[in-house]
Image: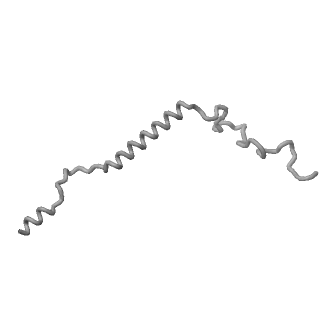
Amino acid sequence: MADEQQSAVQAPASTGRWGPPPALTGFVVLLLAMFALAYGVGSAAGPVAPGMRSTVGDAGSSGRSGPGGGNMGGHLGGDR
């Protein structure tokens, strides 16, 4: 009788192969699909700021622009 109880409690037979859970597989597929979609939309839209230039190899630029980006007319401030 003890033999019958043990056989009923045994785990189901495994095939010997491990596989990821279906939820993980679905998440990875969704992540890849979203990346591909975002990349496609970005490629179709083109550059966001067409006038923007790369700073790589541009030795003449200090990297500063706009207000406070450098010495404006030689006046450093204060009342003179």
At horizontal 42% and vertical 39% (from top left) the residue drawn is 33
Q: Nearer the viewer, residue 32 or 74?
A: 32
| Residue in view at x 20 percent, y 51 percent | 16
User: What residue occupies the far bottom of the structure in this picture?
Assistant: 2
Asked if residue 24 lies left or right of residue 55, the reply is: left
Number of callouts: 0
In the picture, measured across the screen, residue 64 lies left or right of residue 49, that is right
- Residue 18 versus residue 48 in the image, above or below: below
Quadrant of residue 9 within the rendered picture: bottom left
The relative height of residue 18 versus residue 49 in the rendered view (above or below) is below
State the residue in front, 78 or 74.
78
Q: Position of residue 54 (x, y in %)?
A: 64, 36
Residue 35 screen position, x and y as percent:
46, 40
Left or right: 76 in relation to 63 = right
Where in the figure is residue 46, as x and y percent of width and height? 57, 31
Name the foreground residue: 51 vs 72. Answer: 51
Farthest residue, direction right: 80
Q: Residue at x 92, y 52 (%)?
A: 79
Position of 64 with respect to 33 (left or right) is right
Where's the N terminus, which quadrant?
bottom left
The colour mode here is one colour
Residue pictured at 34% horizontal, 46% vertical: 25
- The image quadrant that residue 47 belongs to is top right
